[in-house]
Image: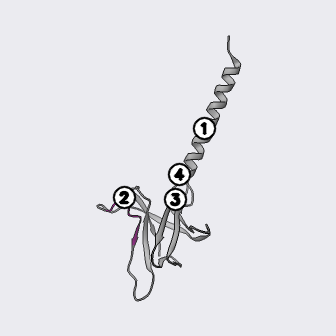
Amino acid sequence: MTNWKAVRIGCAAGALALMVAGSVMAMSGHENQLTFSRPVALPGVVLPAGAYTFDTADSNALDVVVVRNKATNKVLYMGFTTQVRRPSGMSPYTSVTLGEASGNEALPITAWYEIGQSMGHQFRY
């Protein structure tokens, strides 16, 4: 004889576990929080010194990077990138590489590497 009450409780517990696991996965994303002590540039925009979040647009478009102001969550940059391998010898905690700029121009961010990941996102200038 089947105890239907126990079956229903087991199904409800399983469904709850799946919902919680899905929420944790959704929150873990690709977002990195970065702070710059001087202005930096991305294609078409200069970011003043401050705190920003770098993230991929969604799991189906890993080559689209979104940069937001950390305080206001306002999108300041959204653009296509090219996936690149982290240079050998680079610390897994180094998150950006910078290019050169002349005079008082902001240094361009050439690539963003998600913390701990072997692949990064090279910006298209």
Which residue position holds label 3? 31
Crowding near the residue tagged with mark 2, few <14, some 14–19, many ≥20 C-alpha atoms within 10 Å = some
Crowding near the residue tagged with mark 3, few <14, some 14–19, many ≥20 C-alpha atoms within 10 Å = some
Question: Which label sits on residue 90?
Answer: none
Separation of residues labelled 2 and 4 (CA atoms)? 18 Å
Residue 27 lies left or right of residue 100; in this view the side is: right
Which residue position holds label 1? 18
Which residue position holds label 4? 28
4 or 85, nearer to the observer: 4
Query: Is there a contact, CB below 8 Å, between mark 3 and mark 1?
Result: no
Separation of residues labelled 1 and 4 (CA atoms)? 15 Å
Crowding near the residue tagged with mark 4, few <14, some 14–19, many ≥20 C-alpha atoms within 10 Å = few
As shown in the figure, which amino acid type bears the numbered disc 4? Answer: Ser
State the residue lying farthest toward the top.
Answer: 1
Query: Where 16 sits versus 84, above or below?
Result: above
51 or 25, nearer to the observer: 51
Task: Give the quarter of the figure containing the N terminus.
Answer: top right
The segment highlighted magenta reads 90-97
Mark 3 or 1 closer to N-term?
A: 1
The spot of residue 85 in percent (x, y) is: 37, 60
State the residue lying farthest toward the left.
Answer: 89
Residue 76 lies left or right of residue 122; in this view the side is: right
Does the segment drawn in magenta span residue 94?
Answer: yes
Q: Residue at x 47, y 77 (%)?
A: 40
Q: Which residue is drawn at 70% across and 19% down?
A: 4
The spot of residue 78 in percent (x, y) is: 56, 69
The spot of residue 81 in percent (x, y) is: 48, 66
Mark 2 or 4 closer to N-term?
A: 4
As shown in the figure, which amino acid type bears the numbered disc 3? Answer: Glu
Separation of residues labelled 4 and 3 (CA atoms)? 8 Å
